[in-house]
Image: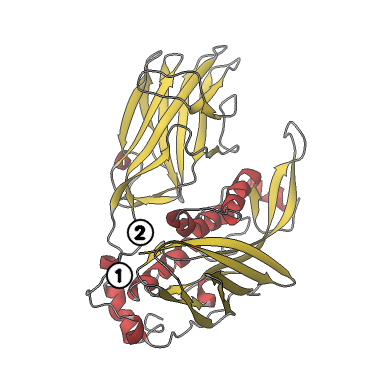
Amino acid sequence: MRNRIWGPLALGGALLSSAAFAANCKNLVLYENGSSKGLMEESTRSFPEAPEWSANWGDFDNMKSPYIRLSGMRNYRGDWTGSLVFDALPVVVQGGSLKLKARSTQAGNLGVWLSGPSGNGKMSFHTLEVGKTHSLEIPVSSLMEGSSVEVDKVGIGLIGVPANQYTTLFVDDIVLSCVQEAEPSVQGSSGLATVKELGPYVFVDVDPASPVREGLFEDAYERPVQSRYTASEKETLKTKTSAKIVVPEENQMRILNFKNANDLSARESWRGWYNSLFLVEKGSLVEGFVPNSKKIFEEAGILTALSDNTVLPLLVADIDYGVSFCGDSACTKREIEDYHLVLTGLPVSYVATSKVRIVYDPYFTITPSGQLPAIELCTGGKCLELTPKTEGTLEFESAGLQKILVKIHSGSQTFEQKLFLEVK
């Protein structure tokens, strides 16, 4: 399938994809002074109290409010742990370190770890002194194996907390120091084809309902994202719903925050489709029910790089799933409500031309029903209408951040979403 898009050009370009995707190592702030509230997964939390995301107990040495506060007391000795999820995650990290500040009202042992699609990495232990702010810098290589790893959660724990001791842990300034900037760079005179040289786009022959994508640039098909549920949890959920995916309420809120956003940076808009679909896939009750969104997202980016960021495959999702939410005030029981998600995305955060070709190829869709929506993209008072296996030109009137209004016609319903793209 490698030469199906633009004939021999696609293969030649694929050999250059590593150059087009040269990683830029950069700092990524996950949480700083309340700037990103995030969430702690309830399924992994054993802290007695829920986190306070913008706590203000005054300024400490080397820690300014607001910060994350984790507190509580139990009548038995034990470990308090939880997985923190931030809006900027998941990301790919190539080496570097995890930096954070931690402070405790009691002497204790802090545990820190990272999680990815394959589960939790190694835990790093640090002794906390009473009333002292500790600035930690932990090599990623000591937390997860591999030269390039995907991080989707940051784990925090207090180990061996004594019984009947009220303890508060403050955490702030969480940073990954070497995050891969995976968007392609504009190559200029690199030898990649220009839009005139590429000619017609050849659509990939794929059943949009199929969870299998053969791979445009690699023969191997990446395994599905690991479900957040254990085998027993899956069986319990299957007795409550016919849905093949169940998304926890806290993850659903993150998806809706992206879907309904009126203002986003170009980078947030670019990452939002993949971040949202990653959360959906984590809720799978049936393995291999949907194609791997990471693979689709990355291949769309590579294909865009081969065109010098002038041909952009549209990323589309149209999925039914269940949302698990609290059924009472104490959250002692969970109820599941059906939800229909339609979502679009673009494979890059920027282009370097005022005109780009938008391609609606079913290969870059996730739609288990096989029904593909019709799409309208509107900017500058002009709209581009697309149906599956069609393409068109989107034109921008000026440089800078552009807002694209997307109208998605799925069945008898029409949904709206806003995408953001920088024109350089």
Q: How crowded is mark 2: few (under 14 residues within 10 Å), some or many (20 or more)?
A: some
Q: In which quarter of the image is the N terminus?
A: bottom left
Asked whether residue 422 appears in the rendered view, the answer is yes
Q: Which of 391 and 222 is in front in this view?
A: 391
53 lies above or below 165: below
- State the residue position of label 2: 182
Q: Helix or strand or loop: what does disc 1 sit on? A: helix
**How far from the left and from the top, in percent, is residue 101?**
38, 27
- Amino acid at circle 1: Ser
Q: Position of residue 265 (x, y in %)?
A: 46, 53
- In this rendering, the count of numbered labels is 2
Classify mark 2: helix, strand or loop: loop
Q: Residue beneath label 1, please?
A: 17
Image quarter in which the C terminus is found? bottom left
Instruction: Count residues near mark 1 (Cα–Cα under 10 Å), then give few for <14, some for 14-19, many for 20+.
Output: some
Residue at position x 44%, y 84% in the image: 201
The residue that appears at 48% across and 33% down in the rendered structure is 34
Question: Looking at numbered disc 2 in the image, what kind of residue is underneath it?
Answer: Ala
Please state the horizontal and vertical placement of residue 97, each as a whole percent of the image: 31, 39
At horizontal 44% and vertical 70% (from top left) the residue drawn is 397
**Residue 354: assigned label:** none
Between discs 2 and 1, the one toward the N terminus: 1
Q: Can residue 222 be seen in this view?
A: no
Q: Which colour scheme is used?
A: secondary structure
Q: Which of 331 and 345 is in front in this view?
A: 345
Position of 132 with respect to 210 (left or right) is: left
Q: State the CA–CA distance, disc 2 to disc 1.
A: 11 Å
Q: Residue at x 44, y 28 (%)?
A: 171
Residue 86: x percent and y percent? 49, 42
Q: Is residue 284 above or below residue 358?
A: above
